Image (cartoon, grey):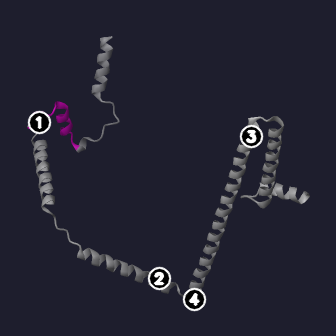
Amino acid sequence: MADFTSELWNSVFTSGPTPTLLLATNATFAALQILLAAMLVATYSIHFAILSFLCGGLWYSINWFAHEIQQAQAKEQEADRLRKQKKGRDSDWKTKGEVGDSADDEGEDTETEGAGLQESSANMTYEPTKEDERVRSEIIDALKASGQANMGGASSGLRPSASTSAARQRRPEDGDRSGEISSSTDSEWEKVDDDR
């Protein structure tokens, strides 16, 4: 019994479900189910039946979760084993000088795949249909019409305002003055002060 208690205490600090922890969990849930069944018989209260149902669901879900974790750990151990095995083969190749041979094999696969792509692209040709040509010409006509409307400016009936004209007249040598406070903003504040 002392060994079981010490193993149970150690299993609490061990990652994953250990057999000792699962045994203690299952024994505890079995005792709880017996207690709830005895209380149900003694009191005939529906509450103990509901608690027993909830306890059974929790018991099942804990066991299911522990089983899933064990499967995941087994897969991880298998993956680690395969990685070590592959690492051992790689080191064998390096000692035997077969690394160059394996690279040549990979190059051959790439060359055949590339040749297959070149052949398939050489066989493919694109022939536009009459519908494609009609759609293309409609798009070009629409672009030409919109380009003429934007270039002229008169077709829309709008004229550029004075502020946009001033913005267009700025030269690159004027520099960027976005960080400075403009004089127009100062004059607007002076107008507000004068109004008061």
At 15% across and 34% down in the image, what residue appears? Answer: 160
Specify the amino acid type for callout 4: Lys
Q: Residue at left 64%, top 71%?
A: 78
Instruction: Please identify the residue farthest to the right as the structure is shown.
Output: 2
**Residue nearest the observer in this picture, 194 or 40:** 40
In primary-sequence order, the first of circles 3 and 2 is 3
Residue 31 magenta-drawn? no
Q: Is residue 165 magenta?
A: yes
* Residue that label 4 marks: 96
Amino acid type, callout 2: Ala
Name which of mark 1 and mark 2 comes first in the sequence: 2
Q: How many marks?
A: 4
Work out how far the residue at label 1 is from the one at label 2, CA to CA, in angstroms: 67 Å
First-in-chain label (3 vs 1): 3
Q: Is residue 22 left or right of residue 130?
A: right
Q: Which residue is mark 3?
A: 49
Q: Does residue 19 lie above or below 147 as drawn?
A: below
Dot 2: element: helix
Circle 2 is placed at which residue position? 103
Figure check: 149 above or below 104: above
Tell me which segment is drawn in magenta.
Answer: 155-171
